[in-house]
Image: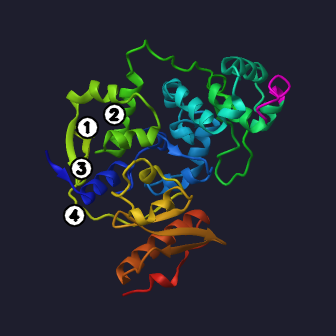
Amino acid sequence: MTVLDSRALNRATLARQLLLERADVPTLDAVAHLGGLQAQEPQEPFFGLWSRLRAFDPAELSDHLVRRHVVRTHLMRRTIHLVTADDALAWRARHDTMLRQRVLGVYRGELDGTDLDELAAAGRAVMADGEPRSMTQLARALAERWPEPGPRALGEMLMAVVPMVQSPPRGLWRTKAGVRNAPLAAWLKREIDPLPAEGCDPVGQALLRRYLAAFGPAASADLRAWCGLAGLPAAVAALRDELITFRDERGRELLDLPDAPRPDPDTPAPVRFLPAFDNAILGYQDRTRIIDDAHRGLSVAGARVVLVDGRVAATWTVEADTVTVAPLGPFTRAVRTAVTEEGQTLAAFLSDNESDRVRISASGSPQ
């Protein structure tokens, strides 16, 4: 079986994540291809798409949110993702059990004895007037019936048992707004796809295909790390005949789609600025294809990172229209120039072309 080293896997990831070269695809198609974007920080998806699309207009993504073509909702790993409306409806029921279990993993003691089906029915009754509400408002509306759990536990579980979206203006470009929740089906005026008969998992199979198209080649453990779902080995077994396999340098079996891009490992990779919690990094159990183990903590700490030759080499922040880059190790003169040029383009994007200021901290001095 062919062994793919970390550089080969890196270039495959960059190609499928639209990071090897910016893509000429509509924003909605990019969100669908990527299987959504992690979005607990509301502005980060805009940065992620800017790094991936050749002519990205942030107003277009805001418009898709307002027109309900995309939604912000708890989904993979019980984190907020920006996904297409179609994917939210198709995937949500498959995530129900995982979402409940993850809330119970934190609040099992507080929620002991709470009838979750009864809680869901009561929550839907409160939301029947069509008025979006904060989680605190929802919890307070139910506190008289369930006083023991406390508002935090009650609200978190309600988000799991009643599929919700975070309604705009939350998540719009350059807009600060609190979270207001609305039922997913009512928001989209379409019913959530029901789970199929027991023993059949078409959603799991669809997720596997979509995951490999955006993240492959990858191990089944990587797929599970991306979505957080159990029961996926059956989906893998059902599709095995249409997949090809490799091994990584650790000996793990890697699954892939036959016709998916696997560029030459020597393909040049441009500098890219990624947002906090970007799934190009978080979408794997083994993230060494893109980030060194020594820096793995950055991927869950909310740091925005810079890719140099396809790997995490720095973090970045922006203040007063100046992009500041903090290298994780020394930069060569050529790398410093490339990072500066891409940083200037980012600064111009963030400031409506009012600034192209970039500062690289001293550790990035040329060698």
Residue where numbered disc 1 is placed = 257
Name the residue beneath numbered marker 4. Answer: 266
Secondary structure under tag 1 reads loop
Q: Residues within 10 Å of mark 1 (few under 14, many from 20)?
A: some
- Asked which secondary structure carries label 2, the reply is helix
Local crowd at mark 2 within 10 Å, few (<14), some, or many (≥20)? some
Q: Position of residue 358 (x, y in %)?
A: 54, 76
Q: Are marks 1 and 4 in contact (CB under 8 Å)?
A: no
**Contact? badges 2 and 1 (CB < 8 Å):** yes
> In the image as oriented, which residue stretches furthest toward the right?
144
SS at mark 3?
A: loop
Give the vertical position of 245 relative to 275 (above or below).
above
With 282 as the anchor, is 141 left or right in this view?
A: right
Q: Is residue 19 left or right of residue 84?
A: left
Cα–Cα gap, marks 3 and 2 = 16 Å
Residue bounds of the magenta highlight: 141-150
- Residue under the point 36% across and 65% down: 270
Res. 29 in view: no
Mark before the other along the chain sequence, 2 or 1: 2
Q: Which residue is mark 3?
A: 262
Task: Answer few, some or many: residues within 10 Å of disc 3's Cα (few below 14, many 20 plus, some between 14 and 19).
Answer: some
In the image shown, does 81 or 356 lie closer to the viewer? 81
Cα distance in 3D space between marks 4 and 3: 11 Å
Q: Quadrant of residue 231?
A: top left
